[in-house]
Image (cartoon, helix red, strand yellow):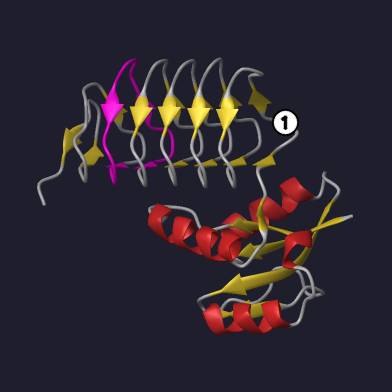
Amino acid sequence: MDKIVIWGASGQAIVLEELLAATPVKITAFFENNEAIQSPIETIPIYYFEAGFERWLSSIEEPSKYFYSVAIGGNNGNVRAKIGEMFKKAGLKPYTAIHHTAFVAGNSVIGEGAQILANSNVCARAKIGKYCILNTASSVDHECIIGDNVHIGPGAKLAGCITVGDNSFIGTNATVLPRIIIGKNVIIGAGAVVTKNVADDAVIVGNPGRQLIK
């Protein structure tokens, strides 16, 4: 049986645990930056901070025999990427997690370390970057290009031919109309309807979507 370790031990990790239960992959350790969070599985140890990771790493013989996943959701794409690359540099392998109820088109492309969760859809010729999270019942339609470290929230709908820049977050039940270009480090609020292109670092809320003034 393959072995996997997970950075993050709260909500996203619990969702990932359910996904992995239907796979031949066994969780062997959790890692966290918050000492108040306990392991979500009593029988599996948890280690804290990079020091804990280094301690765990020194206790195993062959890092290349382990997969890793980063279960940190929300507007934390850059953090997810940093931790993922730390794992990779240590010799572990990124695990691309796809729920058995998800639809992933055969001609789509899924980046390493992505998480495609229950009842989500990745349609024809869509491209999903590395360390992305597509939450429950989200939908990415045909020919969309999703950058690295993007999180698409539960029930969010992206119509066809949309581009989303790196590290962006699209909230629960948001809707993005066809051929829209969303920049990097963007936050789309829950339930927002995006009707026009969005510049880097913007925060969009409402229907129709409007930019909050920083």
Please give left or right for residue 74 compared with residue 7 in the image.
left
Q: Is residue 184 magenta?
A: yes
Q: How many numbered tags mark residues here? A: 1
Q: Is residue 47 magenta?
A: no
Looking at the image, is 21 positioned above or below residue 194? below
Toward which corner of the image does residue 91 lie, by quadrant? bottom right
Looking at the image, is 118 positioned above or below residue 139? below
Tell me the crowding category of disc 1: few under 14, some 14 to 19, or many 20 or more residues within 10 angstroms, Cα based.
some
Closest to the observer, 178 or 11: 178
The x and y percentages for residue 211 are 16, 38
Callout 1, which amino acid? Answer: Thr
Report the predominant secondary structure element of the magenta stretch. Answer: loop
Start-end of magenta stretch: 169-188
Closest to the observer, 48 or 90: 90
In this rendering, does residue 35 appear at all? Answer: no
The structure residue drawn at horizontal position 50% and vertical position 27%, both measured from the top left corner, is 127
The x and y percentages for residue 209 are 22, 30
- Check disc 1 and report the residue beneath it: 101
